[in-house]
Image (tube, coloured by chain):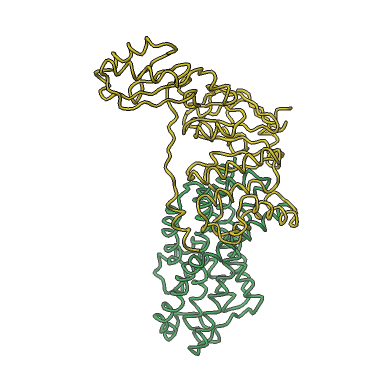
Chain colours: A yellow, B green
Amino acid sequence: MTDIIKVENLVEVYSDGTKAVDDISFSVKEGEFFGFLGPNGAGKSTTIKILTTLLRKTSGTVTIAGYDVEKQAADIRKIIGVQSQDTTVDGDLTGRENITLQGHFHQMKTEDIKKRVNELLRLVGLEEAADRRGRNYSGGMKKRLDLATALVHKPKILFLDEPTTGLDPQSRSTIWSYLEKLNKEEDITIFLTTQYLEEADKLCKRLSIIDVGKIVASGSPIELKREIGADSIRIALENCKKDNANAKELIKTLTDVTEIIDSEECLTVYAKNAGLLIADLVRALDSRDIRIASVTFSSPSLDDVFMKHTGRRIRTEEFVKAPSSMWSGGRR
Amino acid sequence: MTLLSDTRYIFVRYLTKLVRTPILLFFSLFQPILFLVLFTQLLNKLSSFPGVLPTVNGVPIPYLEFAAAGIVMQNAFGSALQSGNSIVADIDSGFLQKMLVTPLSRPAILLGRLSSDAFRVVVQTAIILALGYALGVAEHQSFYVATGVVGILLIFFTLAFFGLAWSGISLALGMKTRSSETVFAIGGVITFPLLFLSPSLFPLNFLPPWVQTVSMFNPVSYCVTATRALMINGYQWSTILPAWGVIGLVALITMSATLYQFRKVVS
């Protein structure tokens, strides 16, 4: 399979000197579901803006379906669909009108648009709300409509900049199922950015972890997690200050423990098989009268991968902008 | 070909938005109508002082008819200044970006906006003139357009052209500052002085000498005088053509600024 997106040594320096994207290279194969995972301000949106012809790069080469992103921008715009981070639905137009207008922007024939609009309304489950104005949609409905507008011309590549940020869990999983369907059934290559670990884990066949403008790791979610090689056990102690050193000494002696580090809760222990170790661990601490507040263990997550490469965790702001949609939901 | 059809889609989008937010239409028509109804009542007596208002067949025209030209001008101002806010809204919401990632013709984005502004000015001017006519009839005053239907069309053209020239200012400001508050504030600051420092609402010879001098450099003066000529006197080409020239000059400057800012936004 051929590389449909090819990025080499891409650099973006803003006029104030900020290096938003710092020499990244990656490629995406045709039909692939590829993701950029990283915290806010990592350079994800900047990269997507360059790839979708909205922003001029400082240096490097970018080709989309063989077209040069700057010299052949017009050709690229015909074959890409883009959903930006802000939901861009025209609130004064109905759902149907929003998609239709986007079809006109793509110079489609009116009868083709009509057919496609009905298809898309069905796909994103907005048939009933189709003739209501966008401003009366809930947050989740707006996102779905926005997605539909990006698909009107049957794009070969779909760029999604944080498609579920600010959505409630239910709307999020609805969007996920559409995306998987699009990728599988319509064979659309999808490039997605996200700050949500589960999103990247669930959807992306391959991903790059990006932080402060640099790609720090790439691979399939499974490969990346395998690199970590160990489960993690997080232990909170009732008196962390007093018992910390003692506990560490003690845990070190247990078999299969690979690493112990200080963490927010108190200690994080990495071990081959956490499930088997936990009983021994609790018993050992108990025998020395070290009081445990809580113990949790988990298999390696992409957050651990991020942690390993950057020394920090991805902080996702989980606040949901739901209130505005709740207000408008009642009135029609 | 695509430029024309793309312009039409943008034009229709803005008009649809306007029609569906009647409050905006109401507010932009409110002030001119208030002027038309109240101001002309207050100054109704002006026509009984000889030599203040221009005369037709030796009889001074009613103030209502005199002021109408100034009021439609004020209306064109108001609508034009809302133009910049629409572009700010599209930038803020990301809709402009959404247009820019499609093959949509770039100039069509501006042309669609401008043509919807022009269309709006024409419709609002028609409403104000019709209302003026109704008022005139109700008060047994004359209110007619000396040049007839063609004259009305020429008035529409003059005001739409003028509106375009001023849309340019608010569009450029909107794209530069990305703040609708700034567009409104600056708009308000320039509208009223320009209106009052011109023979829009008072005859030139009624104004103090310094205002008369200033008004000679005020593009609004030329435009309002031409509109008034079409309403009262007839085809005074010596007034009308220079007015078009002045508007063209203003449009050239404001459109260059708009294009310059638009290029920066688009690239």
Q: Quadrant of residue A111?
A: bottom right
Tell me the quadrant of the picture where the C terminus of chain B can be found.
top right
Residue B145 image position (x, y, % from top left): 59, 80
Residue at (40% x, 18% y) in the render: A269
- The answer to whether residue A108 is left or right of residue B90 is right
- The answer to whether residue B175 is left or right of residue A101 is left
- When the figure is inspected, residue B178 is found, relative to residue A159, above or below; the finding is below
Q: Is residue A212 visible?
A: no
- The answer to whether residue A267 is left or right of residue B169 is left
Instruction: Looking at the picture, tell me which residue is in the foreground, A147 or A88.
Output: A147
Residue at (61% x, 77% y) in the render: B234
Q: Total number of numbered labels?
A: 0
Residue A171 image position (x, y, % from top left): 52, 46
Residue at (43% x, 39% y) in the render: A318
Q: Quadrant of residue A63?
A: top right
Q: Is residue B170 visible?
A: yes
- The answer to whether residue A87 is left or right of residue A151 is left
Instruction: Looking at the picture, tell me which residue is in the foreground, B247 or B136.
Output: B136
Instruction: Looking at the picture, tell me which residue is in the foreground, A192 or B234.
Output: A192
- When the figure is inspected, residue B17 is found, relative to residue A266, above or below; the finding is below
- When the figure is inspected, residue B53 is found, relative to residue A151, above or below; the finding is below
Q: Farthest residue toward the top? A: A253
Q: Farthest residue toward the bottom? A: B140
Q: Quadrant of residue B6?
A: bottom right
Residue A128 image position (x, y, % from top left): 60, 59
Instruction: Looking at the picture, tell me which residue is in the foreground, A76 or A321.
Output: A321
- When the figure is inspected, residue A243 is found, relative to residue A110, above or below; the finding is above
